[in-house]
Amino acid sequence: MTSIRGSLSFLIAGAAALTLLAAAGLLFAVRTSDFAVDRLTVSQRRLDLLAEASGRLTDYAFAAIDTAQATSPSRLRLTALKNQIDSVLKAAGADPWQGETVPGRTELPERMLTLLRSDVANLDAAVAGGLDQADAAARGDTIRGALNGFGLSAGPQLSALVEAERQAVKLAREDIAKTSQRLTIAAIAAAILAVITAILLHQRITRPLLRRIGAIDDAAIAIGRGKLDTRLTVGARDELGLLVARFNRMAASLARREHKLSRDRAALEATVAERTADLTTANERLAGIDRSRRRFFADVSHELRTPLTVVLGECDIALRAPAIAPDEVRATFGTIRQRAFRLHRRVEDMLRVARSESGEITLDFRRIGLARLLADTVESYAAVIRRHQLEITLSLPEAAGDVVADGDWIRQVVEGLIDNAIRHAEGATRIDISLADTPEAAHIAVSDDGCGIPEAARRQVFERFVSRDGEASSGFGIGLALAHWVITRHHGSIVIASAPKTGRGTRVEITLPRAAEGNTPMGFAS
């Protein structure tokens, strides 16, 4: 059978052959271009050196004439020019001509350059001999004769060499142009060959593969849309043919599983409907129990509040009576009133919780001064603090701003935190209350130096009916849960941490924004 691996191997081999052919052509082009450029570079350099030698010889001739006319001739300048000429001619002969000839001459370039250097040496010797003569006119005639002889002997050779190098430069440039043209033609031919080869390989190999893969993709999409009866024609017995056969088996298996799943789904829906009916009945029963519990909670709170209201009223009447007994009795009545008032507030808490659970509570947001509220709260606890032999401090900023909040609820939260510190902070000696202001919010902190709350239990204390130590309580453990609910409805936050200075005790930090959304009934959810 035809193998896709074989087809792909043939495709890769063709691509590799084209790559090698392109690399070989590129290498040949580079080598040819380098040879032509080298020839051009050498010829241009020799041409420049011969031109420089011609200029130096001209300078030497003028210097010789000037020296001959001098009163006391010196050969220093002529010697320097002679050395420069020798150096230039030596550099011109450094690159071998490699069998090249000079047009119109039978001598080789190396031979002509050697003769030129010999003529320069003879000229220098003749000039030196002429400068030794005492008569200036004789010196001039001798030097002019030597220069004329040098011109007749060396001039044609130097001109022939220069013309030869010019011809070499011209030929090198023509070779480069021809090489570029040949490489361009070869590149175009290679590109055409590569395109034709790619088209043939695509028609013979890749296009059939892509067509078959596209058919598999369409079939997979159809099965994904639920058409499980979709099947493919196997076609050629290669790797794709085996894949198509497995695909058909998979589609048949999916169809069988879909049929079984439909039966199971129908049975499951019947079971779910039955269980849903049972859950609905159970939920209705639980809802009735919960309504009864909330109604009982509200009734108990109302029944407790009614007698306490009467007691508070009687205490007020007795305290206002002028014929009351001595001061000790008045102090006793004051204590009774304070205790009754605190119990009244606790009952109010229970009633508020009952109302919040039924969605009946409404927060009364007004602009209040937290500094005054905290001062009144601390003052109301003065007697209790003295009785428990504690110390309470209040730290207020110089100019405390107002906040928009429910003052009764905020007061109840702070009093609840003070109560917790008095009752549960074992080993505490002091309670510190502070108020800090920022442009965006007010920050209230209530801290003690007692036993503190374990870090693992700090989240649980905000849950209802959980005591300060994190254990479940059957008593009235809604203080911190209620505080968390109140502060959250003010769009603030309440967190518990250890006291920052001593590392022990408890510090409760409350953050209240400057403005809040008010007068909206909200349910209490801890």
Image (cartoon, helix red, strand yellow):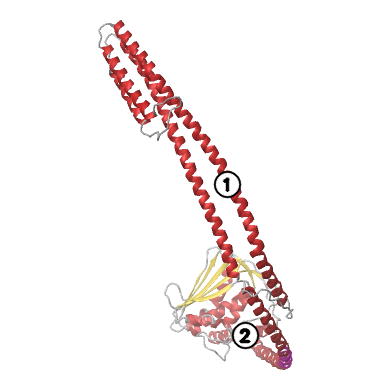
Q: Residue at x 66, y 90 (%)?
A: 297
Q: CA distance from mark 2 to mark 1?
A: 107 Å
Compared with 119, 516 (above or below) is below
In the displayed structure image, the side of residue 30 where residue 124 appears, left or right: left
In the displayed structure image, the side of residue 167 where residue 234 appears, left or right: right
Type of secondary structure dominating the magenta stretch: helix
Compared with 212, 246 (above or below) is below
Which secondary structure, mark 1? helix
Where does the N terminus fall, quadrant-wise? Answer: bottom right
Magenta residue span: 265-277
Residue identified by numbered label 1: 186
The question of residue 271 being in magenta is answered with: yes
Compared with 417, 137 (above or below) is above
Which of marks 1 and 2 precedes in the sequence? Answer: 1
Q: Quadrant of residue 331?
A: bottom right
Q: Position of residue 143 (x, y in %)?
A: 32, 12
Compared with 100, 22 (above or below) is below
Q: Position of residue 229 (x, y in %)?
A: 74, 81
Closer to us: 491 or 176: 176
